[in-house]
Amino acid sequence: MKGLIKVRDQTLEAPKMVNTVTLYKSILQILLKLAGVEPRKVQIQPGTVMNFWAPAKSKKEQMIQKPSVVLLHGFGADGILTWMFQVFNLTSHYSVYVPDLLFFGGSTTASGNRLPAFQAECVVAALRKLGVERCVVVGLSYGGSVAFKMGELYPDLVEAMVVCGFTEAMTESVSDAVLKKLGRRRWSDYLLPTTADGVKELFTVATYWLPPCIPHRVFKDYLEVMFSHRKEREELLEAMVIRDQDYTPYQYHQRIHLVWGDDDKLLQLELAHNLKEQLGDKAKLQCIKKAGHLAQLERPCVYNAHLRQILASLNER
């Protein structure tokens, strides 16, 4: 009886529910390995480590023969969640590299440098260590700023760029205009949510149409696992914006393809047309209908068709 009473008096904790985003990523990682890519930790310098998804070592001969494509994510997710549909679509014909930029996923640095140019420097250093000699860089949003810097600073490595939803440089005037439309004072108010409702708003703005059936718990789980290194990420956002008088358009030697959702509420299509005009004959613009800022997730089949066409045209040259 005493044992029974003790059991009755004990406070039993409810079993902790599995985080849905963590579970999804675990399944996704298994599928990515089956697709021929695997995680690598690349030390750039003491205190700086970058996590990559790269061609599996067992497929080294195939990796050397295939053209290399580097996929750079934006601010709302890590590499594999951003580019999962593209990895599966490209690995049969290309060597695909998907880094987590610094302070995302498993990538960190002890350096205090928060400029996009430093992100570009680290990505390039890692690619060289992985044996990449030439590549096409595909950048989404913040990853687009890193892609532009890679093209500017490392023309020997970067053959061409595909940029989605970002300008060559986020000047104060462009930043202020976008934030005003969002009703935000700072980028971190939007891109670093602190509540599940904030996460839902993040995706509502970034998409053409967010399915209303997504449970609130998914946004709560996403908040729990996807927004670490808040202080450092806020510093990245501050360093992303430059004064108008400090911006000088760069004359790129590479071909630049702009792929834009025609209902992008963050960096609207007008900015894409202005960017194309600024870049001149080397740039081409392709729009995806019924897509927002995250066109590669919303309409992956259409996006992949555009990307495959772009990559094939580069290989024909």
Image (cartoon, rainbow, N blue to C red):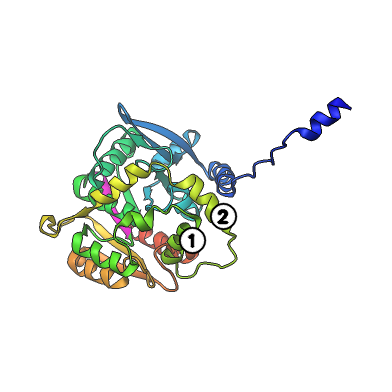
Q: What is the secondary structure assignment of the residue under circle 1?
A: helix
Q: What is the secondary structure assignment of the residue under circle 2?
A: helix
Q: Is residue 9 left or right of residue 221?
A: right
Image spot of residue 292 (x, y percent): 41, 68
Q: Marks 2/1: CA distance?
A: 9 Å
Is the residue under label 1 in contact with that under label 2 (CB below 8 Å)?
A: no
Note whether residue 304 is visible.
no
Q: Residue 223 or 308: which is nearer the viewer?
A: 223
Image spot of residue 61 (x, y percent): 44, 36
Q: In this view, does 184 lie to the left or right of 219?
A: left
| Circle number at residue 200 | 1
Q: Residue 59 or 279: which is nearer the viewer?
A: 279
| Amino acid at pointer 2 | Val
Examine the residues drawn in magenta and state their main secondary structure: strand
| Circle number at residue 215 | none
Quarter of the image holding residue 187?
A: bottom left
Image spot of residue 75 (x, y percent): 37, 52
Quarter of the image holding residue 202?
A: bottom left
Image spot of residue 243 (x, y percent): 15, 56
- Neighbours of disc 1 within 10 Å: few (<14), some (14-19), many (20+): many
Establish if 216 lies above or below 231.
Answer: below
Residue 3 part of the magenta segment: no
| Amino acid at pointer 1 | Lys
Residue at 21% from the left image edge and 47% from the top image edge: 155
Q: Which residue is label 2 attached to?
A: 218
Query: Magenta part of the protein: which range?
Result: 157-163
Residue at 24% from the left image edge and 39% from the top image edge: 113
Note whether residue 145 is visible.
yes
Establish if 301 lies above or below 108.
Answer: below
